[in-house]
Image: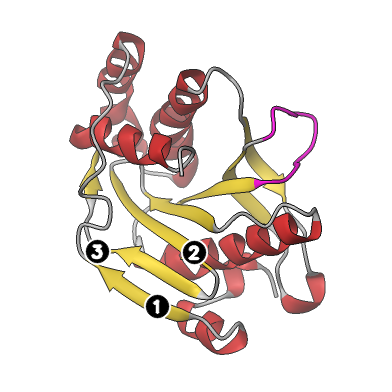
Amino acid sequence: MAYSDFTLSELLKIFDLTIKEILDLFAAVEEVECSEYLAFYLKENIALAVAINTEKARSEMIIAPILLEVRRRLNYQVSLFSGVDFNVDNERGLNGVCDFLFSRSTEQLFIRAPVINIVEAKNENLKSGFGQCVAEMIAAQLFNEREGNGIKTIYGVVTTGTVWRFLKLEGKVVHIDLTEYYIKDVNKILGILLTDFQQ
């Protein structure tokens, strides 16, 4: 098995998880004004990414620029990885490639603890990405514990680039925000992503 093979219902049984579906989980988070550069870049490229309509195009033209803006706003004190192998526990299926992940470490040559945020890109169906994203979040939790950095909360995102859904894992509880955020709400999306690092 690999991250992409998991469904959410399988994860609940295998890892003894509880799901809490919450409307407006991040409602209290304040918006963060995006830079002129990001605003221009998105204006120039969203239509193209949507027209091409592949996961790769959406990742490169919408998702990555937003994540790079987060890294810049955090003064490059976090590392951002794209398309990396994150093999934590092969026997339990916690292995495979993560679309994007953030660590609070500044080390960029390899992944170091603590991994704080997993971003899973999907071309169409967000719900289908929940299993994969939660599996990657469990792996991040285990990875951090093994490295002696058992932070309390791991955050996750499943996104098409134009629609964003946010999750968080605390212990054995997965919180899934029922609110969908659209790319026109990029300031709110940035606010939520930046809040992940302030907890």
Q: Is residue 163 left or right of residue 151?
A: left
Quadrant housing residue 103 = top right
Distance of label 3 from label 2 (alpha carbons): 15 Å
Q: Is residue 180 visible?
A: yes
Counting residues from the start of the chain, the first of labels 1 and 2 encountered is 1
| Magenta-colored span | 105-114
Q: Secondary structure at mark 3?
A: loop
* Residue for point 63% across, 37% down: 104
Q: Judge whether 91 appears above or below 107 on screen.
A: below
Distance of label 3 from label 1 (alpha carbons): 12 Å
Residues at discs 1 and 2 in contact (Cβ within 8 Å): no
Q: The N terminus appears in which quarter of the rendering?
A: bottom right
Residue 29, image x, y percentages: 26, 41
* Residue ID for mark 2: 169
* Residue for point 80% across, 30% down: 109
How packed mark 2 is, by other alpha carbons closer than 10 Å (few <14, some 14-19, many 20 or more), is many
Q: Per the image, is 106 magenta?
A: yes
